[in-house]
Every structure is written in C-alpha cells, then in structure tokens.
Image (cartoon, grey):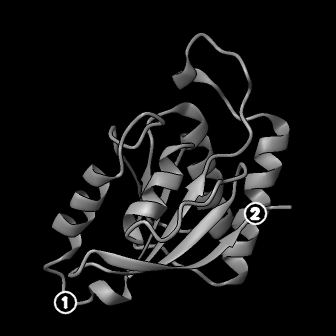
Amino acid sequence: MRIFVMRHGQAQPLATSDQDRELTEHGKVEVAKMAGVLLEDQLNFDAIYVSPYIRAQQTANIVKSVLATSTSLTTLNFITPNDTAQPLQDYIYGHFSEQDDKNDQSILIVSHMPLVSYLVAEFTNGQHAPLFQTASVAEIDYNVNTMQGQLVAHCAPY
C-alpha cells in the first residue's frame, strides 16, 4: 500500500475558531501546485481521508478537482491537529487488512501539523518524523499486515 500524507495549504491566521480557518489565496495556489505534482505521477487514490477542519476540506477538494478523481472524500473526526496517530493506523488496518488487493491500494490523508508528522513517525515505526511545510506531501510504502512502512519521498510545493 502507498500512503500519502498531506498537510493542508496555508490558512488564515485568525477565524472564529481554529476549525473555521480557511485557506488563503496563496494556500490555494500551493495546494493546486502539489496536486499537479500528484497528477504528473498519475496517482489514483482508492481512498481520501480528510480532517473535518475547513482548511483541510478545502485542500482535499482542490486535490480531488485537479486529479479529476471520482474517489469520494471520507471525513474522519480523529485526524485533527491535536489527535494522535494510532487511531488512524488502527482504522487503516481494520479497513484494509482483509482486502486481497491491499498492496495495490493508494490512499491520501489530508490533515494538520503536528499530526502529519506523527502519522509519518507512526507508519515508519519512528524512523521519520519530518516537519511539513504547508501543502507538502510525504509518501510511505506501507505493509498493512505488519503495520510498518518506509518513507519513500517528501515533497513541498516550492
């Protein structure tokens, strides 16, 4: 399985709540640029998991639009900035471990710092915990059965 972990694009610094912060115009541009990189790699995601926060939802929708994919977005309430990585790893194991084609699956996770760094650390057994620029993406080659992976790439829009 290939897991792509993406941080949302640059967001407005202030809003009525952290959940309501929207992408800036610059954030929308950087997300579209990263989505273009994913498009060049001819990626087709079998699942797209996204935080319920507005900036993550906007990011996922831009990626979905650029990729012109019919894959629906699945909002997960446990991938917000202050969450931990283990629930998502358990979710992926529970959802994919019994599938025959799990090794051929590609998923995208759109979330926030610091969780995106924690996810990479969890999926690679602590080998990597990169800092993420806004709209950057990490790719992990992941074995669902052993719940272990290897960081393959980490790419930023600039």
> What label does residue 134 carry, if any?
none
- Within-10-Å neighbours for mark 1: few <14, some 14–19, many 20+: few
Question: Residue drawn 77% across and 43% down?
Answer: 27
With 13 as the anchor, is 48 left or right in this view? left
Disc 1 target residue: 100
Q: Looking at the image, is mark 2 or mark 1 nearer the viewer?
A: 2
On screen, residue 128 above or below 148: above
| Left or right, 52 with reference to 146 | right
Spatial CA distance of label 2 from label 1 is 33 Å
Give above or below for 104 relative to 114: below
Q: Is residue 31 above or below residue 3?
A: above
Residue at point 40% right, 73% down? Answer: 46
User: Which residue, given by chain and number where applicable, does mark 2 sit on?
Assistant: 156
Q: The N terminus appears in which quarter of the rendering?
A: bottom left
Amino acid identity at mark 1: Asp
Residue plotted at (61% across, 60% down): 130
- Looking at the rendered structure, the kind of residue marked 2 is Ala
Q: Residue furthest left?
A: 98
The one of 26 and 158 positioned closer to us in this rendering? 158
Determine whether the residue tagged by mark 2 lies in a helix, strand or loop: loop
- The reply, left or right, for residue 120 in relation to residue 157 is left
- Give the residue at x 68% y 64%: 66
- Which quarter shows the C terminus? bottom right
Count all numbered tags in the image, as a single digit: 2
